[in-house]
Image: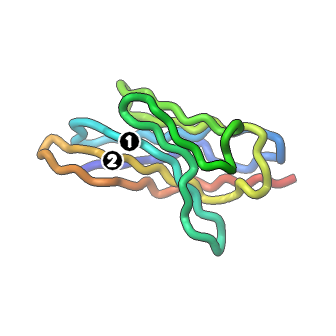
Amino acid sequence: QVQLVESGGGLVQPGGSLRLSCAASGSIFSINTMGWYRQAPGKERELVATINSGGSTNYADSVKGRFTVSRDKAKNTAYLQMNSLKPEDTAVYYCNANIRTYSNFRSNYWGPGTQVTVSS
């Protein structure tokens, strides 16, 4: 069994910063790509940023220069540092990870999400 748990969401004023964490636990043999997605009310879930096992990153155009994705492979944890936050960044943020288990089963896993609200 594999679990992803996000933390670090909350309410922040425009221009502020938040740091999200995503911890993976369970029967994990290896993790390939870890990523962050978000879903605003009435909108589809969208990619925010990803980081692969080699450390290569990919960002949505809307967050480039403001958000930074990173990971600690030893802790099976990914982070999303969000700076210069805007009201349009308000959404539920989800962590995703492509994980191979010790039973040699590979799949994409999702966390339950954490709310980020940017408002004055």
Instruction: Name the amino acid, label 1.
Output: Thr
Residue 36 to residue 66: above or below:
below
Residue 33's label in the rendered image is: 1
Residue furthest to the bottom in view is 42
Instruction: Name the amino acid, label 2.
Output: Asn
Task: Identify the residue at horizontal 42%, vertical 39% (top origin).
Answer: 23
Q: SS of the residue at dot 2?
A: strand
Question: Which of 110/54 is in front?
Answer: 54
Task: Identify the residue at horizontal 59%, vertical 63% (top origin).
Answer: 39
Q: Mark 2 points at which residue?
A: 98
Task: Identify the residue at horizontal 77%, vertical 52% (top origin).
Answer: 118
Task: Identify the residue at horizontal 64%, vertical 65% (top origin).
Answer: 40
Q: Residues within 10 Å of mark 1 (few under 14, many from 20)?
A: some
Q: How many labels does the image show?
A: 2
Residue furthest to the top in view is 74
The quarter of the picture where residue 72 lies is top left
Decide if residue 113 is on the left or right side of residue 65: left
The quarter of the picture where residue 109 lies is bottom left
Q: SS of the residue at dot 1?
A: strand
Give the colour scheme of this rendering: rainbow
Q: Residues within 10 Å of mark 2 (few under 14, many from 20)?
A: some
Question: Which of 19/104 is in front?
Answer: 104
x and y percentages locating residue 42 in the rendered image: 64, 75
CA separation, marks 1 and 2?
5 Å
Residue furthest to the right in view is 120
Residue 25 to residue 48: above or below:
above
First of labels 1, 2 by sequence position: 1
x and y percentages locating residue 44 in the rendered image: 57, 69
- Contact? badges 1 and 2 (CB < 8 Å): yes
x and y percentages locating residue 52 in the rendered image: 40, 37
Question: Which of 56/45 is in front?
Answer: 56
